[in-house]
Image (spheres, grey):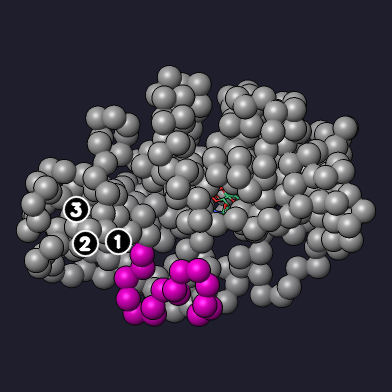
Amino acid sequence: ATEIRLAARPHGAPTQENFDIVDIEVPSPGPGQLLVRNVVMSVDPAMRGRMNDVKSYTPPFVVGEAMLGGAVGEVLESTVDGFEPGDHVLHQLGWRTHAIVDAERVAKVDGSAAPLSTYLGVLGMPGLTAYSGLLESAEFKPGDTVFVSGAAGAVGSLVGQLARLKGAKRVIGSAGSAEKVRYLTETLGFDAAFNYKDGPVAEQLAAAAPEGIDVYFDNVGGEHLEAAIASINLHGRIAVCGMISQYNATEPNPAPRNLMQLVAKRITMRGMLVLDHWHLREQFLSEVAPLVASGEIKYSETFVDGIRNAPQAFLGLLNGANTGKMLVRL
Ligand code: NDP
């Protein structure tokens, strides 16, 4: 068995040096536990936060210990009624090839209903983030013009498609390459998209949204947030899902410098955490899973192969190497 441990906490952008790849004996399950061989694991932007020694909504990773995160694996050994070898389970002990998990902390998943990887992406935590963030946090309503940043990623790509399917007037996305911009307009049906690296975000957004925006779904923060505040209409709503442009920052970012516009435009800006929206999970799955199965909602996955390349997958995620969900296939 192999696991990835946090070797040292990063200052600024993490590197391979922050990770240790360690070979260990395959562990044995105790009472109430399962031995699971992981098949696919997630790398998520939030893991960057957990590499810091900062108290947050999840505890920080411990230096010298294996990292944690979503994974789907196959049960190899079970001491628990109701779980058989061959079952697939979703759990939180990623970053390792083999995991000992408490049966009460896993969810069975069905690989014949949808590919196992989708339980970590479009039908999993990122999917529910998009759904609940748009509908509950941003209070989306038909006729809204919606702008989403990080639009070619796991969360953003679903936000844009849901807005379009639910009657948005116009859906605009930003992403970090020409190829991703083409993917947004040509494959996902966004009305407009731009590469934020091509020029000032405020100018590109204003050009893409001549009548302004009503909703901004923020995955990026900083200059994107400032541009959205500048372009947002009266009574506009901003769901703050993440601020990935800040995760490696060692100094506070000056933007947004225009928060006073919250007053003049009576803007609502609301932070969201997917954990608060778990009550929507059944509704989300019953609505979105059929649309994914029929192809009306499209999703992409970027796979990196092998546990030893998991750090590289994570570093790539932070640098935009992914289109759609970034995953490690084990
Ligand atoms: P993504 O699949 O979107 O991957 C991250 C993407 O961020 C990269 O592909 C890259 O794309 C983009 N990025 C990296 N650096 C920058 C930068 N400086 N400026 C602009 N874009 C950048 O990840 P997720 O879909 O998993 O997560 C998206 C956001 O949602 C993150 O902020 C994350 O923290 C947040 N999140 C929040 C949750 C909550 O409960 N609040 C739950 C899940 C996610 P590009 O090539 O376009 O730069």
Residue under the point 41% across and 25% down: 290
Return the residue at label 1.
93
- Answer whether residue 63 is magenta in the image: yes
Distance, label 2 to label 1, CA atoms, is 7 Å
Q: Image height check: is 94 above or below 326? A: below
Residue 317 point in image, percent of width and height:
51, 53
Q: Nearer the viewer, residue 126 or 173?
A: 126
Determine whether, in the image, residue 225 is placed left or right of residue 86. Answer: right
Distance, label 1 to label 3, CA atoms, is 10 Å
Mark 3 and mark 2 lie on one chain; the one further toward the N terminus is: 3
Q: Quadrant of residue 34?
A: bottom left
- Identify the disc placed on residue 101: 2
Q: Which residues are magenta?
A: 53-68
> Does the residue at mark 1 contact the one at mark 3 (Cβ under 8 Å)?
no
Residue 284 point in image, percent of width and height:
46, 37
Q: Nearer the viewer, mark 3 or mark 2?
A: 2
